[in-house]
Structures are given as structure tokens and as C-alpha cells.
Image (cartoon, rainbow, N blue to C red):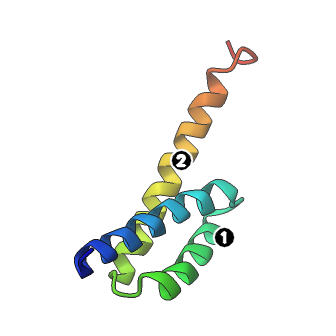
Amino acid sequence: MGMSSYILDCEDKFWDDVVEIIKESDTITEATTRAMELWKKDVPFLDEDDVFGQVEDYWNDFRSEEHTSELQSPMYL
């Protein structure tokens, strides 16, 4: 396993962890704070602004899907 493979594995694990953080968080502030703490510890070689922006995108996507699912529940139909 080469160094680039190790780095890609670290990035994959980080983004998987970010998705879990988003699922567990009540607010975008909580999600970004926790994700940025993890970023500093696990993948500081990634660009901070890119990570912050991607966390916000994941948050918006997750909450949008969650809202759509709620509206499709039998209670709303």
C-alpha cells in the first residue's frame, strides 16, 4: 500500500465520519464544528475552505432528503 493509497483511505474515512456527524447533529453549526475538529485531527492536509464548504453541501443535501421523505410519508399524502 503506497502513501497515496493511505491518504485516500484517510479522506474516505473522514467523509464517512462527516456524514455520520451530520446525521447526529441538530444544527449546521454543531455539524460544522464537529467536522472541523475532526478535520484538524485526521486530514489537515485538505483545504480548510473546501472541507467547510463540502460539510455545508452535505448538510443541505441530507436535510433536503430528510424533508422530502417526511413529505412523502402517509401522514402528508
Q: Mark 1: which amino acid?
A: Glu
User: Which residue is identified by label 1?
Assistant: 30
The foreground one among 33 and 2 is 2
Figure quadrant of residue 3: bottom left
User: Residue at (72%, 59%) from the top-left corner?
Assistant: 26
Quadrant in the picture for the N terminus: bottom left
Give residue 27's position: percent from left, percent from top: 67, 62
Callout 2 crowding tier (Cα within 10 Å): few <14, some 14–19, many ≥20? some
The foreground one among 55 and 21 is 21
Q: Which comes before the other along the chain, label 1 or label 2?
A: 1
Give residue 62's position: percent from left, percent from top: 53, 47
Callout 1 crowding tier (Cα within 10 Å): few <14, some 14–19, many ≥20? some
User: Residue at (53%, 64%) from the top-left corner?
Assistant: 18
Give residue 10's position: percent from left, percent from top: 40, 73
36 over 24 or under it: above or below: below
User: Residue at (57%, 83%) from the top-left corner?
Assistant: 37
User: Which residue is identified by label 2?
Assistant: 62
Instruction: Tell me if 15 is positioned left or right of 76 in this view.
Output: left
56 over 52 or under it: above or below: above
C-alpha distance separating marks 1 and 2: 15 Å
Give residue 61's position: percent from left, percent from top: 47, 47
Instruction: Tell me if 73 is positioned left or right of 68 in this view.
Output: right
Q: Secondary structure at mark 2?
A: helix
Q: Mark 2: which amino acid?
A: Phe
The foreground one among 56 and 7 is 7
**Residue 3's disc number:** none
The foreground one among 70 and 42 is 42
Q: Secondary structure at mark 1?
A: helix
41 over 11 or under it: above or below: below
Figure quadrant of residue 9: bottom left
User: Residue at (47%, 56%) from the top-left corner?
Assistant: 58
Instruction: Tell me if 74 is positioned left or right of 43 in this view.
Output: right
